[in-house]
Structures are given as C-alpha cells and as structure tokens.
Amino acid sequence: MPGGAVDMEAVGGYEDILRNGDAWLRDSASEGRDGLGWINLPARDIAGVEETAKWISGFDAMVQVGIGGSALGNLMLHGALLPPYWNELPRSKRQGPRFYMSDNVDPADNRMIWNLIDPEQTVFTVISKSGSTAETMANFLFFWDRLKVDLGPKKAAEHVVVITDEEKGVLRPFADEIGCRRLVLPADVGGRFSVLSPVGLLSGAALGISARKLLEGAAEMDRRLAERNTVFENPAWLLAALSVAHYRQGRNMTVLMPYEDALERFCEWFAQLWGESLGKNGTGSTPVRALGAIDQHSQIQLYTEGPDDKLFTVMTVAEPAEEITIPETEEKALVSLSYLFGQSMNSLRRYEALSTAAAIAKSGKPVVSIEIPKLDERRLGAMIQFYEHVTALAGYLLDVNPFDQPGVEQGKNYTYGLMGRPNYSAQALEVTELAEKLSLREISV
Amino acid sequence: MPGGAVDMEAVGGYEDILRNGDAWLRDSASEGRDGLGWINLPARDIAGVEETAKWISGFDAMVQVGIGGSALGNLMLHGALLPPYWNELPRSKRQGPRFYMSDNVDPADNRMIWNLIDPEQTVFTVISKSGSTAETMANFLFFWDRLKVDLGPKKAAEHVVVITDEEKGVLRPFADEIGCRRLVLPADVGGRFSVLSPVGLLSGAALGISARKLLEGAAEMDRRLAERNTVFENPAWLLAALSVAHYRQGRNMTVLMPYEDALERFCEWFAQLWGESLGKNGTGSTPVRALGAIDQHSQIQLYTEGPDDKLFTVMTVAEPAEEITIPETEEKALVSLSYLFGQSMNSLRRYEALSTAAAIAKSGKPVVSIEIPKLDERRLGAMIQFYEHVTALAGYLLDVNPFDQPGVEQGKNYTYGLMGRPNYSAQALEVTELAEKLSLREISV
C-alpha cells in the first residue's frame, strides 16, 4: 500500500531496537565477529598499502582485476576524488598511473585494456578473497598469460600484486608460488564493506588519494555516531529508521540522487552495500541509482507523477572544487537566457537539486536531503562509514543478517555446472531444464 | 501484493486493446500527430546528417552539449557500436574524432573537456528543441564564450552545429544570427524517442557508425511487427502485455540486465524511455538499470532472495565481436581453476546469463530472455524501434499518454524562480517555503 504516512512517533519507536543494534554491532566488532571487521578498518595499520601504492605510483598504468566489492569501491573513490577524464590527462597532470578496471568478463574490454598498456610499465592487481571468483580469475588468467609471454614468468611476477585472504583460498599460495607482492584482505570484512581495506585503498593511494585521510574521516564519523544515542540526534539511526519505516509503508525503493558527477559511482557502491545487505528472506528495499541534474531529464517525471513507492535522498556538495561563471553573450536570439548570465554554474546545479527535492516533496513523496561540505578524502571517508552504519542498522531493524549473501550461490553453482566443473553435474542438469522452460522468443531482424 | 501469478490467459486478454493501440499508433503517425514522429524516422531523408557527419569526422574532437533525450541516445549508440576506450585510442584506430558529452551542469567536467580539446580542431554541437533547457544552455554559453575568445566570433561559428526545432525556440534564430550549420529536430518527435533523428545520428555517423544501417534495421523491425497481429506472435505486444500484467500484480519495477558491457548505456536510454513515458497519473513501473555479470556481485542477492516485486529481462548477444580463450596456467596453486582452462570467455559470460535467469526463475520471479544475434547497426536499430513500440503500447495499456512529460515542469519552474528569471517570483517563494520544511540534518565531519 504505497503512500502510507510515516510520522515522527513511528520513527522514534525504533529507538530502543536501534540502541540495541548499535551496541551489538560495536560489541561484535570488538569480539572479531565475522563480517563486522569494517567498523575497525579506520584503526588498522596501512603502512603496507602505502608502501605498495608508492611503488605503483611510478608506473604508467595500473590494471585492477576484481568484481563487485573488489571493484565498485575503487571506482567510487576514483570518481569522487580524482579529476574527471583521468586516463586522458597528460602524465604531468596526474599524481599516478592510468587506471583500468577489469571487472566484467568482456573479451572486448579486456583485449582493449591489454592493447592500451605497455606491460613493462604496468602493475596488475588481482583481488578476490577466495580466488574462486570465476570472472576475476578468467580475466586474470588472460592478463597473467600475456604478461608471462611478454616478460617471462619471473619478471611477470614482479608486475603482480595479489590482495586476498591471509589463510584461505588459492591466491595466497599462488602469490607464494610465483613470489609476487601480496596484501591481506581481512577475513572479517565482507566484500561490500571492504573499500577502506587494502581492496579500495591500494589503487586510491597509488593514484594520489590520501588513504590516511579517508580513514581519519571514517574514524571521526564513527566516533561522532557513537556519541549520539537518540534517533533524532544520531543521523545513522535516523536514516535507518526512516528507510525501514518507509519500506514498511510499501515504499520498496530507495533512490540515491547526488547532484555531482563525481558521485555517480558512489551510487553504484551504495547499491551493492544496500541491495546485497538487505535483500533476503523475501524482504529488502531496492536501491535505485540516479544522478542529478541528468535524471531530471529522464526519471523525474516518474518520480513526481508516478506511484508513491520510493524514499528519495537528494545529495549535494556545498563547496565543489571547480566553478564556472556562466558567461553573458551578445546575440539577440539568446536574450531570453539573460537570467543565466553572470551566474554561478554551481548555484544553478544547487538550485536544481533544491527544486527537485521540493518538487518531489510537493508531489507528496518522502525526500531526505544530505549535504556534504566538500568532496575530499576526510568527508568521503566519513560518508562511507556513515552509509555502512546505516545499512547495518537497517538490517538489524529488518531482522536480516546484513553481512551474508547466500542468494548468490545458486547462479554461481549453475555456471560451474555449465562450465563442466567437476562435481557440479546435477547443477548443470537443473539449469538446463530450467532454461528450457524460460520462453526465448525470436525478435531478431 | 507482490507475487501474484500472471498466466497466459491474462496476457492474451490484452490482445484486443493491443490491436487497437497498434493501429492508433500507426494511424496517428501517418497523420503527423505530435509525439508519434518516431515511427516514421526510419524513412526520413538523412542526407543532411550524413554530409555534416562526414565534415565532423575529419576533426580531432567533438563536444556535444545536450541532456536527457539529447544525450542518452548518443551515449547508447557509441557504447554499443564503437570500440571501448574510444577516446584513448590513437587516431589511426578510430574512424572519427574523440567525443565528449557535456550533459550535466558540472563545472569540473566542462572545464576539463575544454582543457582536453584544441578549439581549432573541435566541433561543438548544441541540441535542444526549444533552446530553453537551462543545463544545456548554461554549458553551451561556457563553450561558446571560450570559442569566441579563442577563435573570434566569425571563425567560432564555423565550429558550431545547432540541432533544434525548425520553427520554435531560440536556437534556430541563433543559428541564423551567427551563421552556423543547422540540422532539424523534427517537431513531432519527443526527446526520448529521438535517437534515430539527427539528435542521435549525427554524432554516431561522425564517429563511423552507419546511420543508414541503423535506420534499415529499425524499418525492418517496424515492418515485421506490423505483420504480426496476435499477442503471442508479435514480440512487442507480448512484452508490453507481460510488463503491464506483472505491474498490475504488484511488480512495480522492470529490471533490464544485459550481459555485455557495450549495452550498459542501452539501459540508461531505456530507463528514460520507460520511466518518462509511463510514469504519470500515479502509475508507472520503475526501470532498474543493471549489468551482468557485474550485478551478480551486487544485486543478485536482492533479486533472488528479496521481494517478488520485479519483472526481469536478461539480454545477451549471441555472437559478440571479440573472443578470448581463457588460457591454461601451470602454477599448482591454481589447479582448481582448470575447469576454466581453454574455455571461451564469451561462453562463460553466456552461461552466467543463463544461470542468472535460471536462478531468478527458480526463486519464483518472472524473467524474460532476449538474445540479439549480433551487436551491429542493423540489430541495434531494430532493438531501438522494438523498445519504442513496447513502451508506447505499454502506455496505451496503462491508459497514460506515453508522449508527454508534464511532471518535469514543476522543478524547472522552481529553478527559474531561484535563478531570478523574470515572472517566476511566485515559484521562488514556493520553493523556498518548501525547502524550509525539508529536514536537513547535520551529519558532516
């Protein structure tokens, strides 16, 4: 039943559960419980990351092989904190190598990445907790093979960094076998919560982002949240409560709509965090990735006049790094644009964000506004920690485990079966039978 | 009430309405009715587009200024039909100039675009039906000013192409005033249906995409659809009927999940087409943009174990342009990956798509599979025309006008008010009052 109201009393009613949930999260983290390690990441030692990053920063290119939690956090950090069109900048305007993400199993992309780099001048990182991720390992096998052919096995190993579990899986022994550099993906940190571990920090730091400041911001947010113990004072409690209350009123989507191109990938990172943490047991609100002002010209019609089935967050940056004053022009035909002349482009964007939030509110739908003072390492680290708390608490309110992902196994096992992996023949049979029932219709020309 | 079943009888029940709707669409198009011009685009003369594109193709860079329907179609065509990392390729490997899209009002992006191009060697296109789109005109004013400063007004005009309405708006008189090249955005074609007009075709053709083949594919799809007049023979009728039937059973999202990086932007284009066409009068299904296999590691947990509130379309390409054979490797640590050795990367991806569709189906949620034989101009043109038909027919079934977008005006008018545009002071007052009611919470560090 979309459209149900959420009053402040209902939100306040979550306070006791949130207090318990918050204490449970922090206690479990100090006890080293599986999945809770993200809370402690801001305090971990990153000397190894910084040293490896410094070494990588002198190369011409860096190729990261990873997917999901081993890719989205990196893209988010780079998008938010590096200049746009990074790879197209001359080396003198970049604090680090060109960067390529090999996440999808896409032959065209992988081959092009190989064609664009000089293996002698490139570092390859491969990231997987277990080393069993099919996409990551298929892509890595391609690059590793080419690298050995071009440089010889010994020198090839000098161009590889492995980020994996300290004990489990195949990549740790692989690193030992070839003798390459290695960093640890902490065992108690899940993929979608790993951006402030070596997974996210290494490429960020190699490209000139301060890992230390990211962690400082995250630690500061963590402290501030720990000090506030009412739902109206603690913004993570409040946003978790609002999200769950609106979800229970039939709003099964949460739209995150930053007004800043640099935050486009923040939405992708958030979408995994939110969707994979909360989507289980038949429950879960669907994250919808949006971008202002672009989606005003794509989705706002639906957002304002469509069904009341979404909670919106409009996000702005108070002091963007760049500014443009919209110039006046003398052509008579453009005199109706004089309201733009001499105005700040950032103000226009900010007014659009405000107008969108107001138009959504006027249409009767719930909207939250979040403003980030500046987009720098400290503030981004804080936002990361903030959303991780919100997500974990929302999971606690919804009574689901926000740290597992049992639902991804079925598809993986079907793929193993189809690929002929030993011991998966039953899965191969099942997926083939299911596929026959899926109606494939001919619509080609 | 998510989870309601949709049986074939229910889908068949839409047949008469679909027959009427299809006839209405085609009759209205031949009568030149507003918004229906897209049906006739494949038959329009594109000599002007081809000539202008040929001229642009010799330049080093092309900057397109436009947003929404004047941007998403171009990005979709380029993503699907050009090699990845286009701008990073040496000129000898590209059939046309580097391409930059200035869509968002983002000072950092626009300034960087200016820094990356040589104005003497760059063509700027500005696309807006009315010339009143604030974002487009703000960005264009920036580039136009810089261009005049660098090249002088007369020479600057030689680097500009305007695509706008033949009669209305400010850009037609502007083009006459400065004496620049001009192409016509047909009056009866809406922005989100305009990709096969000069809006989408010009940049595509300038970068080496065959506009003629795109139109041939669209025309062929149009003919094939016109020949089929039952819901189970006509795939556009079937997909429209399925979409609406599932929507009416409480599935308020439609997820489009191609397994092909080149189709990532197809989802963005589809999202505008679907969301803006159907989201009105309190109705409308929300388009959810996904990408396989990446979103297996982000959204599949939610898709399979979350609520039954989505209709899924998994899209594959039968014969991708590139192939990689996953190499064998000799390290002992990687022996468990032997099931990958020697296999085709495209097969892995295809099996993952099949496995995802099967896993979704096994979880009890509805999934449609669409396979495109090849990703070339003819097939992509056909898919564009196909989805435009599906969307228009879904609008007819839902009893909304799929060709208008009244809901975007509110936010626009608020922005005009905040920017101090004459005659919008009442809007300024209203948005300010609304903004005060929106709770902005301090969460910064």
Image (cartoon, coloured by chain):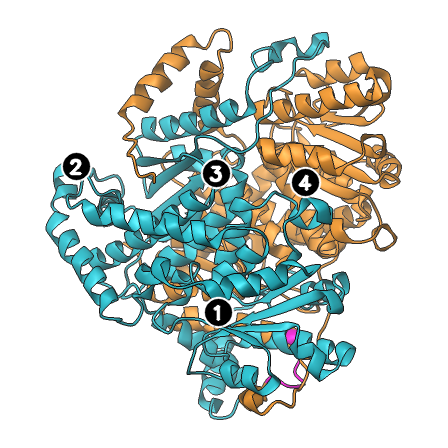
Chain colours: A cyan, B orange
Q: Amino acid at mark 3?
A: Gln
Q: Amino acid at mark 4?
A: Val
- Mark 4 or 3, closer to the camera: 3
Residue B357: give its label: 1
Cα distance, mark 2 to mark 3? Answer: 27 Å
Q: Main secondary structure of the magenta part?
A: loop
- Mark 2 or 3, closer to the camera: 2
Q: Nearer the viewer, residue B417 or B318?
A: B417
Element at label 2: loop
Q: Is residue A362 left or right of residue A242?
A: right
Element at label 1: helix
Q: Is residue B94 left or right of residue B420?
A: right
Query: Closer to the N terminus: mark 1 or mark 4?
Result: 4
Residue A299: give its label: 3
Which quarter of the image is occupied by the C terminus of chain B? top left
At x 35%, y 16%, the residue is B430
Is residue A175 found inside the magenta-colored segment of the image? no
Q: Which residues are magenta?
A: B340-345
